[in-house]
Image (cartoon, helix red, strand yellow):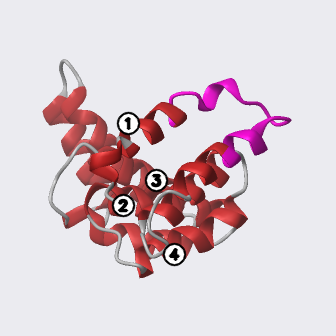
Amino acid sequence: MSTENSGWEERIAAAWATIDEYDEATAGDFRALVDALVAELPESSPVGPFERASAFDSTGHSDKAVPLYQEALRRGLTGYRARRTKIQLASSLRNMGRPQEGVALLEPELTAPSDELDDAVRAALALCLSSLGRDREGLSLVLGALAPHLPRYQRSMGNYARALVQSGQ
């Protein structure tokens, strides 16, 4: 079945728009909603494990999300969802005490084609670096991501960000 012809993308987006309506007691209901939508996809679709992983992750189950994110990537998930998967997987790995794996996953994303997820890549990578005791590198990434959004001081903050990781600073 083609997700474009069925309105599937709109329905999964609508489901995600309700995530804040669920609490710990009803989180299983949200995951069931996502599972029902995923069941409409071809069994080999990489989108299914991504959506299921995201549902587990968003309801506090990083341990169940990690293998599903990995499966989505193994199945060949591409584009925007693949980048989201890497960000979310790195965050989950960090939550599980495996930040080095998150760093390895996100560092290549620093040189990937730019999109609206660039700052999220840097934020997640900064958290992984901090978990490894590499706070200066993490702060440098965050300041570098923040600088372009400031109404003033962009150049100064960019320079400070670079100075944090230059040797001897």
Task: Kindly identify the residue that appears in the image at 60 percent across and 60 percent down.
Answer: 92
Q: Is residue 61 above or below residue 45?
A: above
Q: Callout 3: few (<14), some (14-19), or many (20+) C-alpha neighbours within 10 Å?
A: many
Query: Considering depth in this image, is 75 or 116 the residue closer to the camera?
Result: 75
In the rendering, at what x and y percent does residue 151 appear?
19, 18
Task: Kindly identify the residue that appears in the image at 27 percent across and 45 percent down.
Answer: 144
Q: Which residue is mark 2?
A: 1
- In front: label 1 or label 2: 2
Decide which of tag 2 and tag 4 comes sooner along the chain. 2
Residues tagged 2 and 3 counted as in contact (Cβ below 8 A): no
Decide which of tag 4 and tag 1 comes sooner along the chain. 1
Residues tagged 1 and 2 counted as in contact (Cβ below 8 A): no
Q: Which residue is mark 3?
A: 124
The amino acid at mark 3 is: Ala
Q: Which residue is mark 4?
A: 70
Residue sitting farthest toward the bottom: 74
The amino acid at mark 1 is: Glu
Marks 3 and 1 sit apart, C-alpha to C-alpha, by 27 Å
Decide which of tag 3 and tag 1 comes sooner along the chain. 1
Query: Considering depth in this image, is 124 or 61 the residue closer to the camera?
Result: 61
Q: Quadrant of the C terminus?
A: bottom left
The amino acid at mark 2 is: Met
